[in-house]
Amino acid sequence: MLSRVALIALASAPLASSLALGASMPLPLRLTAPLRAPLLMMARRRAAKEVEPYLSDAELEEQATAEAQLDLGERVDGMTTSLGKADELLPFPGPAVPADEAPPTDSRLLMMVLSLFPPGRAPSSKLQAAYSSWLKASSARLCAAQYLLSAEQFLEDWENGRAMSEEEIAAIDLAAAAKAEERAAAAAAAAAAAAADGSAADAPPAPAEVVDDEEAMEEAGVQFVLGHLSVLRADSRADAHEWLASDPVAAKSGYRSVQVHPWHRSTEPALNVPASHQQGTYLVHATDVAPPAGPKLRAATREAHLAWLRESGRVSTCGHHIL
């Protein structure tokens, strides 16, 4: 009997401290049910024996077990019991998430301008700088501006790192000078012929050589650049021509031809494949044959033509223009 009382006394002290700790500590640090249940049952049996000494040990153990289970059910909760402050725990609305604004639409026509230099001539560095400044000042209407490169390039020599010799450079200069003399002689012959038959007024003026003007067209030994390709927004074709009249190169009679066309660009993804940096970009400017054969041929081959373009996977931008 002494040993049992001593056991209960020894167990009751940790029980009191455990219960006190369990009541004050956060739920994750409390004693787990397998450890608390035997201690609670022992304390229940002891308390019941003092109040009801006539109960047998089996009855005391059954009563203590029921009370311990009831106590555990009240104390161990799956965090589902409402604290009466559910409204305070609801998410509250924060600041409005800014939505992506749709880009403003431009109702002006999309125009394509193809400007070509005379053979063997190109803008001087000063004139080209003035042209670049003019483009930057026109950014409100300009969509794209590109150089049209010729086939006269040294890509292979450049990639292989081969430098041109002095003799090769001199040969290029001599060929350019010979071409300039041929053009001058042809222009003089045309002017003389026009004067002889009285049609000088209708003959186009020969390009004047400007010596003192640094912003001018000059002879190109090798014509690497054929001209300019521009895509812009304009209210009408007349509006586009008015803007082009302020082109510094045009002011120096630097173009042999300028074509302005309303352009209907396709937005189809298959016809707008991003160009790779490892690939060259080429302009294909194709026009129909004269009516009535041209429109009929276009109507008969249009679907096959578009399917061919889509399947190629190499069309960076595409569209048809109106003459």
Image (cartoon, grey):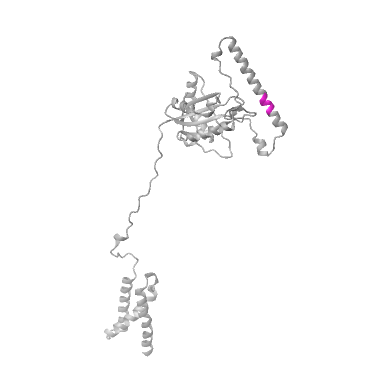
Can residue 5 be seen in this snapshot?
A: yes
Q: Report whether 206 appears left or right of 111.
A: right
Frontmost residue, 47 versus 251: 251
- Residue 204 coordinates in the image, percent (x, y): 55, 18
Question: What secondary structure is the magenta-colored segment mainly?
Answer: helix
- Residue 191: quarter of image: top right
Frontmost residue, 322 versus 215: 215
Residue projecting furthest to the top: 197
The residue lying at 49 percent from left, 24 percent from top is 298
The residue lying at 60 percent from left, 15 percent from top is 190
Is residue 322 depicted above or below 74 in this figure? above
- Residue 90: quarter of image: bottom left
The residue lying at 70 percent from left, 28 percent from top is 171
Quarter in which the N terminus is drawn: bottom left
Q: Report whether 240 appears left or right of 46.
A: right
Is residue 160 depicted above or below 297 in this figure? below
Q: Which residues are magenta?
A: 173-177
Can residue 310 be seen in this snapshot?
A: no
- Residue 265 coordinates in the image, percent (x, y): 46, 31
The residue lying at 37 percent from left, 90 percent from top is 2
Query: Is residue 257 a member of the stretch shown in magenta?
Result: no
